[in-house]
Image (tube, rainbow, N blue to C red):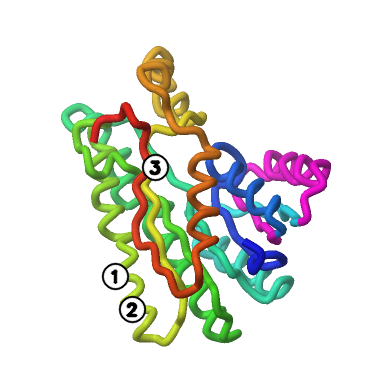
């Protein structure tokens, strides 16, 4: 991880859960970390925590609504002006609604299928990062995409699984790599698909049925956010000539 010291990383959805843990780990390894989310106060508290821990890196809180293209473009403009650009981009933010296939609300389905957070913002981030990288001609850049493991098991959480399957196909790192190579932009792309991770996700997803949220994490030993963060560190630690395309993480007891 030494070559990443002082380099700039952007982590979306950095206010809680997996995003917050990844942000803390990259700061611990000496990176300049821009953490973005809608809840700025939570990232500010996290930045203070990192500073008090004496880590060599720094966490810079930034508010950004990832459903708004202007917000995204403004965020990247600020990062480029203040830090020249992004060396590592980790697209962690996402959304999900607990809406069944047969009785779910059409508006929620449309929200997940349109899924500006999962799909459109990802490609807008890819486009912006590649433009900046090309302008500066930097090497060792890395783009890490997150897609849920549920995309491979359509019976797990109903309609959400179908949406994640579509999202995963759109986030295929091989397809993205082909296009960036044609444009002579040298960035490594990776898709990480975590299984059940003990965060606040299930409690939000099952907000109307708290018992289901509790059962999600009690029926097996789930992953912890640090397990996913360690996977990110592993990918970044790989030599520049090594391409890790896709990574699947899940608890040992979780069914495929």
Residue 101, image x and y in percent? 19, 33
Residue 9, image x and y in percent? 61, 62
Residue at (30% x, 62% y) in the render: 172
The quarter holding residue 158 reads top left
Residue sitting farthest toward the top: 211
Residue 121, image x and y in percent? 44, 60
Residue at (51% x, 57% y) in the render: 90
Dot 1 alpha-carbon crowd within 10 angstroms: few under 14, some 14 to 19, many 20 or more: few
Q: Earlier in the sequence, mark 3 or mark 1?
A: 1
Residue sitting farthest toward the left: 102
At numbered mark 2, what does the secondary structure look like: helix, strand or loop? helix
Q: Which residue is mark 1?
A: 175
Q: CA distance from mark 3 to mark 2?
A: 26 Å
Q: Nearer the viewer, mark 3 or mark 2?
A: 3
Circles 1 and 2: CB atoms closer than 8 Å:
yes
Residue span colored magenta:
31-56
Q: Is residue 126 left or right of residue 111?
A: right
Q: Which residue is mark 2?
A: 179
């Amino acid at each position: 991880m030494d070559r990443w010291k002082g380099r700039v990383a952007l982590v979306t959805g950095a206010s809680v859960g997996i995003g917050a843990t990844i942000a803390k780990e990259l700061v611990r390894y000496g990176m300049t970390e821009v953490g973005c989310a809608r809840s700025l106060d939570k990232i500010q508290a996290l930045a203070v925590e990192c500073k008090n821990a004496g880590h060599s890196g720094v966490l810079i809180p930034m508010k950004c609504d990832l459903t708004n293209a202007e917000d995204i473009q403004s965020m990247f403009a600020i990062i480029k002006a203040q830090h020249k650009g992004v060396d590592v981009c980790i697209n962690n933010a996402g959304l999900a609604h607990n809406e069944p296939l047969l009785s779910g609300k059409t508006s929620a389905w449309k929200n997940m299928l349109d899924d500006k957070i999962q799909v459109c913002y990802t490609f807008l981030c890819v486009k912006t990062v590649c433009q900046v990288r090309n302008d500066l001609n930097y090497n060792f850049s890395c783009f890490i995409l997150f897609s849920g493991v549920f995309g491979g098991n359509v019976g797990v959480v109903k309609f959400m699984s179908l949406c994640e399957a579509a999202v995963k196909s759109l986030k295929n790192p091989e397809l993205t790599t082909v296009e960036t190579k044609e444009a002579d932009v040298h960035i490594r792309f990776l898709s990480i698909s975590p299984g059940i991770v003990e965060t606040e996700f299930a409690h939000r997803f099952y907000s109307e049925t708290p018992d289901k949220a509790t059962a999600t994490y009690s029926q097996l030993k789930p992953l912890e956010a640090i397990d996913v963060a360690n996977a990110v560190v592993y990918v970044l630690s790989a030599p520049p000539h090594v391409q890790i395309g896709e990574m699947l993480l899940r608890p040992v007891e979780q069914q495929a």
